[in-house]
Structure formats: structure tokens, C-alpha cells
């Protein structure tokens, strides 16, 4: 399976972060995120969940179904990615976290149910399969945009379940921003269309930096 990896300069063993891409796959605005994790001392690993023989639309559909249910080929691929990290000599397998964006945020929650993961950071994502087993979740630091009318309600639902289940968490809804506030724009027509739609897609540097700070602080505590 194709994957991108960014490594810290220190030889290790170091903590690791499994990074799950959004619906567009491994695209260039994910590279700065991997690089920043490496600069912070993490081995950052992003597998390509679309690295299958099936056509693009079929892969996307299968991934979305797997994310919602918590079962399927894409979930198995993420388990394999955790296996890879666990056996990487630069990785401390006792200190692994996961993060993801949009579709990847839902997968990050699914991976939060794996005993090898100590912390999960979903960004504007949700998984119904996760909510059915939320009592088994690791601690969660979650971020949503107030203007994202598609996922705002899902973010509030996640908050309710985390509180009801007693899962340690840091949950924040960022005022004045929409979907994809964490990742820089690639200037595609889909992104421009998304800016006008109910998700109000758009990078926001202030919200992104605050979310980075919260996520890294949360990871330091949970992976210590």
C-alpha cells in the first residue's frame, strides 16, 4: 500500500501519529501536516486508502461505507498501518495516536477503539460505528467549525456521547469557520464550490493554529 511518511531527526524510539486523509486522498496539502508532526518529534504515517484496483468512485464509496460502519477493507488497511508503525524501530509502540480530516476524521474515531491508540484527534468527521462502541474509546480531542452546517450537528452529537460515556476529551467548535479550516486550500474548483455551500469550506490560520496547539498538548499528556 502506498503511504507517505515523515520522520523526526532524532533516532527514536519516538511517538507516532497515524494520519488519515480526507475524501480527496493523499494530496499535497497533507504534506505540511506530516512535516509539522515530524518537527514536533512524531513519526507521521499517512496510508493511501484508495490504493486499490477498483476505480476511484468505487474506492471512495467503499471507504465511506467502511468509515461509517467501522468495518471493511479501509479499516483493515488502517489496522495494517498500525501494525507497520508498531514494528518500525523508530516508533515507540506504547505511544501512538491518530488524527484525520473529514472522512479521515471518521476513521480516526474508528481507530480510537483500537487498544494500541492512546489518543485520537478527529477534525470535522464522524462515524456511526464508533458511536456504537464509544465506551471503548481512547481519549479524544475533536475540532469542528461553527459554519459547517453538514458536520456541526455531528460534532455536537459526538460531544454528547463522549460526555455520557465518560471518555476523557477536549471538544471545541470554532466560531466563524467552516469545514476544512485545518488544511490549506489547493485552489481546486471543488474547494471553491465548497466555500459557497453549506459546509463553508475554507482554511482559517487562526483556528488551525489553535487546533494544533490543543491537539499537540493533548497528545503530550496522553502519550506520556
Image (cartoon, rainbow, N blue to C red):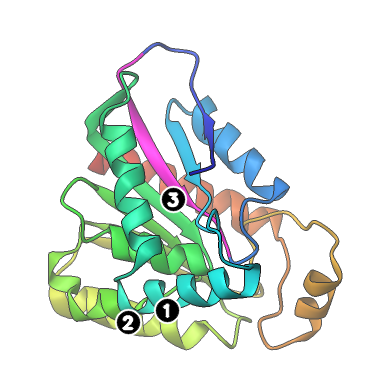
Q: Mark 1 points at which residue?
A: 65
Q: Is mark 2 on a helix, strand or loop?
A: helix
Task: Read off the residue under disc 3.
Answer: 214
Circle 3 SS class: helix
Q: In this view, does 202 lie to the left or right of 63?
A: right
The structure residue drawn at horizontal position 13% and vertical position 71%, both measured from the top left corner, is: 135
Q: Residue furthest front?
A: 53
Labels 1, 2: front one: 1
Percent across and percent down for residue 183 are: 66, 55
Mark 1 and mark 3 in contact? Answer it, CB < 8 Å: no
Q: Give the residue at x 33% y 34%.
A: 85
Q: Distance between the residues labelled 3 and 2?
A: 25 Å
Reading the image, the residue beneath label 2 is: 128
Q: Does residue 66 sit above or below 116 in this rendering?
A: below
**Residue 145 % position (x, y):** 57, 73
Helix, strand or loop for disc 1: helix
202 left or right of 39? right
The stretch in magenta equals 12-22
The quadrant of the image that shows the C terminus is top left
Amino acid at each position: 500500500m502506498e503511504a507517505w511518511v515523515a520522520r523526526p531527526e532524532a533516532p527514536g524510539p519516538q511517538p507516532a501519529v497515524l494520519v488519515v486523509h480526507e475524501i480527496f486522498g493523499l494530496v499535497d496539502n497533507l504534506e505540511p501536516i506530516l512535516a509539522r508532526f515530524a518537527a514536533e518529534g512524531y513519526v507521521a504515517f499517512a496510508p493511501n486508502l484508495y490504493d486499490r484496483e477498483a476505480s476511484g468512485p468505487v474506492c471512495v464509496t467503499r471507504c465511506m461505507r467502511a468509515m461509517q460502519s467501522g468495518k471493511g477493507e479501509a479499516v483493515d488497511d488502517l489496522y495494517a498501518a498500525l501494525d507497520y508503525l508498531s514494528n518500525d524501530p523508530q516508533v515507540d509502540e506504547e505511544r501512538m495516536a491518530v488524527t484525520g480530516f473529514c472522512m479521515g476524521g471518521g476513521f480516526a474515531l474508528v481507530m480510537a477503539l483500537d487498544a494500541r491508540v492512546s489518543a485520537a484527534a478527529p477534525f470535522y468527521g464522524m462515524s456511526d460505528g464508533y458511536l456504537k462502541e464509544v465506551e471503548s474509546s481512547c481519549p479524544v480531542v475533536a475540532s469542528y467549525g461553527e459554519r459547517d452546517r453538514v458536520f456541526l450537528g455531528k460534532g455536537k452529537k459526538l460531544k454528547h456521547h463522549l460526555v455520557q460515556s465518560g471518555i476523557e476529551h477536549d471538544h471545541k467548535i470554532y466560531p466563524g469557520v467552516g469545514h476544512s479550516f485545518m488544511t490549506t486550500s489547493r485552489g481546486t474548483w471543488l474547494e471553491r464550490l465548497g466555500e459557497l455551500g453549506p459546509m463553508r469550506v475554507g482554511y482559517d490560520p487562526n483556528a488551525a493554529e489553535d487546533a494544533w496547539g490543543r491537539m499537540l498538548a493533548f497528545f503530550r499528556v496522553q502519550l506520556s
